[in-house]
Amino acid sequence: MLAGGAAQAQKSTKMRPKWIGNTPKTANLPFYFVEVHSDASSTLQGARASVMQELTANVERTDKVTVKEVFEDNSIQQYNNGQTTLQSADKYQLNLQVEGSARPISSRRIDEFWTYKQRGGSPAVDYRAVYAVERSGEHADFSTISSTTSYAAHGLWRSAIVPGWGQLYKGSYLKGGLVMGGSIVLIGGIIYTSSMRTDYANKIVKTHIAANKRTYATKRDNFTMGRNICIGGLAALYVYNLIDAIVAPGARRILVHQSNDGRRSYSLLPTVMEDNSAGLAFNLRF
């Protein structure tokens, strides 16, 4: 049989998780990830139940087994979606038939995401979830898996190179587009005002008419002020871009931490360096 427990239920957010269509590779780990999807139910509970068929089909293909029965136990999790309290079974079992005998396989739901939509005039739940499934014959420690909205240095170094890139990488597409677009506009403003300032400065040198000199000097000073405003605006936007890239939460992603079972595993975790700067620690265990 296959038995599993869900992670603490997460309220669906507006930001699409990074794991959708991009689950972590687990070739050398004792478990693998399965992403499931359903849009055929009008309720969240119904959507959760409907993806079990897709999950079991994946287990059958991967482990070359036959699923005979699916049932839930009495373990229930509760959480509030801001308006109503919802419930979901956090454990389930699949009875498997493998070469004439039963074989237990464990699973855990790591994260889920859903949106509500209208289809044919009726409400529907577009539901996605990612499960970790123990490989046949292995013993998996699912406590090494977590989901997070933190990106630490992943977003920071990208935004340090190209303002807005870190936000786009984290899934904040509107914010990233605004930062990147604003930076381009301000850089264009600096180039234009600097060019016009130089042009009027040259005109001052070339003319001998006092009235023209005063006019050109006024325009040169105006463009100098405009250039300085653009430079200040770009500097402020760049600093905000760096702070936001490292502090603001992004789309949920999956982390695999170091395991204690003696197998090779990896983890990518935010950390603080010796000089108190933010960084990313990479751990690899064989």
Image: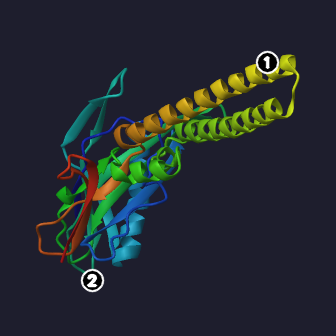
Disc 2 crowd rating (10 Å Cα; few below 14, some 14-19, many 20+) is few
- Name the residue beneath numbered marker 1: 214
Please tell me whether residue 16 is drawn above or below residue 83 in the rendered image. below
Q: Quadrant of residue 141?
A: bottom left
Disc 1 crowd rating (10 Å Cα; few below 14, some 14-19, many 20+) is few
Disc 2 versus disc 1: distance between alpha carbons?
96 Å
Residue at 59% from the left image edge and 39% from the top image edge: 183
The amino acid beneath tag 1 is Arg
Residue 195 in the image: state x and y as whole percent: 74, 39
Residue 47 in the image: state x and y as whole percent: 44, 44
261 and 248: which is toward the camera = 248
- Quick one: SS at disc 1? helix
Q: Quadrant of residue 265?
A: bottom left
Q: Earlier in the sequence, mark 2 or mark 1?
A: 2
Residue at 28% from the left image edge and 77% from the top image edge: 28
Residue 99 image label: 2
Query: Does residue 81 appear left or right of residue 71 in this picture?
Result: right
Residue 23 image label: none
